[in-house]
Image (tube, rainbow, N blue to C red):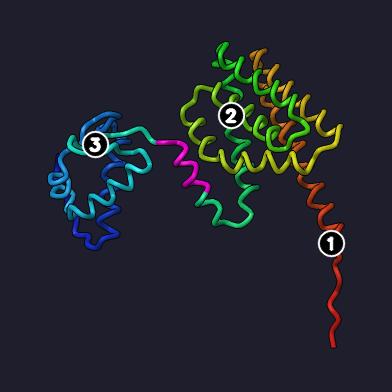
């Protein structure tokens, strides 16, 4: 391993340098899943950082699954835990105001591309999984928690059927926020006509994938999202109509 030349000093910059090293090696393919890393002493020397700092950074990366530290054996390149990444991503987004609308827009971009790929890539197992969650959705219309979960799992199964690792990872990173959105929508909209529209929309999406028609599938999914947007808009209007707005008296 070539020594990293740097005049940077300070704990923060040293940690950044260690992380940048691992990320660049992973992107370049110089490090692959299961590869054993050089010894801690060698890494610290070549990166120009102290061993305590290196140890802390490596421990943090191991918590995300990037590294697999085996006591007595060394450190290896691990497989990132998408669940942990989702938790971290959710935590970061939760610090922002009005983030849900942005997340839902990102979801549209991810799922519409995923469904187009699913039309040509979905296998029998994928179709069975989507059908399974559609069936669960049909039988949980009166249960916001179970119905919201089934709704999310239906869409997750569609994304999985794309067999696109990038789209699956991106969708997984939004999972917690999307689950929350599905459940909250079920709690808000429980009328018969709305639930019937929900069922028909999901059935149309599924049949479009079975029919291997990417344009129709994309259109049906966007129509489904448009219905959700309209329901959220109506809910917001109703919320403000119920509020008693009064102009404060001035003296």
Q: CA distance from mark 1 to mark 2?
A: 37 Å
In the image, is 167 to the left or to the right of 47? right
Residue depicted at 20% across the width and 54% down the height: 52
Q: Which residue is mark 2?
A: 156
Residue depicted at 75% across the width and 26% down the height: 201
Which element is circle 2 on? helix
Q: Residues within 10 Å of mark 1 (few under 14, many from 20)?
A: few
Q: Is 128 above or below relative to 45?
A: above
Asked if one can make out residue 20 in the rendered structure from this viewpoint, the answer is no
Comes first in the chain, label 2 or label 3: 3
- Quadrant position of the C terminus in the picture: bottom right
| Mark whose residue sits in front, 1 or 3 | 3
Residue 232 at x, y percent in the picture: 76, 45
Which labelled disc corresponds to residue 243? 1
Q: Which residue is mark 3?
A: 70
Q: CA distance from mark 2 to mark 3?
A: 33 Å
Q: Is 153 above or below relative to 2?
A: above
Q: Closer to the camera, 170 or 56?
A: 56
- Quadrant position of the N terminus in the picture: top left
**Magenta residues, start to end:** 81-90
């Amino acid at each position: 391993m070539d020594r990293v030349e740097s005049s940077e000093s300070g704990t923060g910059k040293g940690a950044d340098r260690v992380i940048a090293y691992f990320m660049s090696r992973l992107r370049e393919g110089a490090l692959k899943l299961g590869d054993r890393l050089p010894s801690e002493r060698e890494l610290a020397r070549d990166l120009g950082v102290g061993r305590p700092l290196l140890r802390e950074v490596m421990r943090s990366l191991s918590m995300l699954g990037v590294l697999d530290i085996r006591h007595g054996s060394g450190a290896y390149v691990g497989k990132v835990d998408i669940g942990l990444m989702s938790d971290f991503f959710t935590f970061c987004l939760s610090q922002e105001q009005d983030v849900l609308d942005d997340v839902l827009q990102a979801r549209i971009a991810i799922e519409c591309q995923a469904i187009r790929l699913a039309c040509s890539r979905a296998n029998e197992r994928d179709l069975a999984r989507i059908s399974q969650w559609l069936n669960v959705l049909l039988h949980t219309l009166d249960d916001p928690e179970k119905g919201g979960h089934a709704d999310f799992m239906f869409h997750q199964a569609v994304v999985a059927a794309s067999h696109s690792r990038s789209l699956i990872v991106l969708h997984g990173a939004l999972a917690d926020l999307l689950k929350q959105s599905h459940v909250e929508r079920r709690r808000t909209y429980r009328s018969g006509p709305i639930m019937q529209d929900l069922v028909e929309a999901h059935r149309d999406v599924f049949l479009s994938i079975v029919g291997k028609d990417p344009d129709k599938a994309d259109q049906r999914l966007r129509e489904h999202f448009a219905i959700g947007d309209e329901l959220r808009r109506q809910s917001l209007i109703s919320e403000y109509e119920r509020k008693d707005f009064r102009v404060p008296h001035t003296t």
